[in-house]
Amino acid sequence: MDIAFTLDDLPLWPQSDPPAGVTAAGIVADIRRALAAQGVAGVYAFCNSWPLARGPGYARILDDWLADGHHVGNHTHSHPHLPEVSAAAFIADIDAGSQALAPWLDRAPRRLFRHPLCHWGETQAKLAAVNAHLTAERYTAVDVTSFSYEWTFNRAWLAAREAGDRRTEAWVCDAFLTFAPAQLRHDHAAAAAWFGTPVPSIALGHNVAFFAVMAQDYLAALRSAGARFVPLADALDGPVQAATGSVVSAAFRVIQQKLALAAGHPIPQIAPDHKETFNRITALAAGRSD
Ligand SMILES: [Zn+2]
């Protein structure tokens, strides 16, 4: 399984702050250490520029990311969800991101963009307007073929920690290391079936506290499951790329699931053998809203 790993929402998880005792810089430093330890190089982080006005520490997070040999792509300024805003407002937010992120974007080998929540546009008019703007701005839009749902595990983990429930906290960590490789295998097979040929997976992580703690074991678990980490460029010239931004969709789903939904043949979101684990994680996470 070839897998291009990407990271979303640097320098700070959208409109939220890390839990007490944890900082955005600390989370990203842990993830950088994990990537270095596992030999995963040249990772694109899709960034929001809104935190940059908070203070110089946020720009330093991006400087340090590039200093490790990783790259930055645009993920808009303020992380608007396209179904909730007009095309014009979304486009203005892309441009605000382009401007504020220019010092880092301009040093990347490719000019890449990722839609917040992978929303391409829920009407033909919005889809066309955003696609045309991305083309005019020389962006390549990058979607995702596999989620590990670490943001849901993060909420479950935080809830267990807040409750002082060490046993559940440990279970959430163990469950993630079983779930994530299984979900990657599920998505990898589903993408190959949908596109009719094996394709490199495009996976992602987020800079949340749980992922910082788990990143090294997560990457090792994927390797043990047969993953080979490849540059994102390897995933940008095949059928996945040709299909990116190709259908009207308001679904927060990976690309083959969005395409299958649009075609009227939905495919399972979660690896069937691990649905029960995911349901328990979702229930544990339900107590938290961030
Ligand atoms: Zn995002």
Image (cartoon, rainbow, N blue to C red):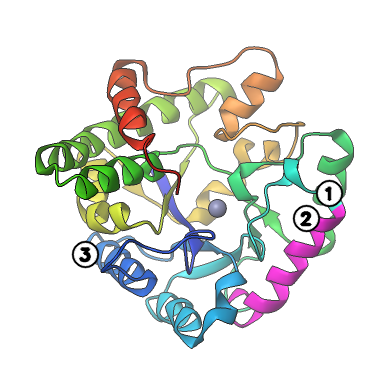
Residue 106 makes an appearance in the image: yes
Instruction: Tell me the SS state at disc 2.
Output: helix
> Label 1 sits on what residue type?
Ser
Q: Residue at x 46, y 37 (%)?
A: 146
**Magenta highlight: main SS:** helix
Q: Position of residue 154 (x, y in %)?
A: 33, 46
- Above or below residue 289? Residue 225 is above
User: In the drawing, does residue 48 fall left or right of residue 23?
Assistant: right
Q: Is residue 286 magenta?
A: no
> Are discs 2 and 1 less than 8 Å apart at CB?
yes
Viewer-side residue, 89 vs 228: 89
Which of pointers 3 and 2 lies earlier in the amino acid sequence? 3
| Marking on residue 86 | 1
Q: Position of residue 272 (x, y in %)?
A: 36, 16
> Label 2 sits on what residue type?
Phe
Q: Residue at x 50, y 35 (%)?
A: 199
CA gap, disc 3 to disc 2?
Answer: 37 Å
Report the residue marked by disc 3. 37
Q: Residue at x 61, y 83 (%)?
A: 103
Which quadrant of the figure contains the N terminus?
Answer: top left
CA gap, disc 3 to disc 1?
Answer: 43 Å
Report the residue marked by disc 2. 90
Ligand 1: does it lie within 8 Å of the C-beta at label 3? no
> Label 3 sits on what residue type?
Ala
Magenta stretch, residue numbers: 88-105
| Marking on residue 283 | none
> Are discs 3 and 1 less than 8 Å apart at CB?
no
User: In the drawing, does residue 139 fall left or right of residue 272?
Assistant: right
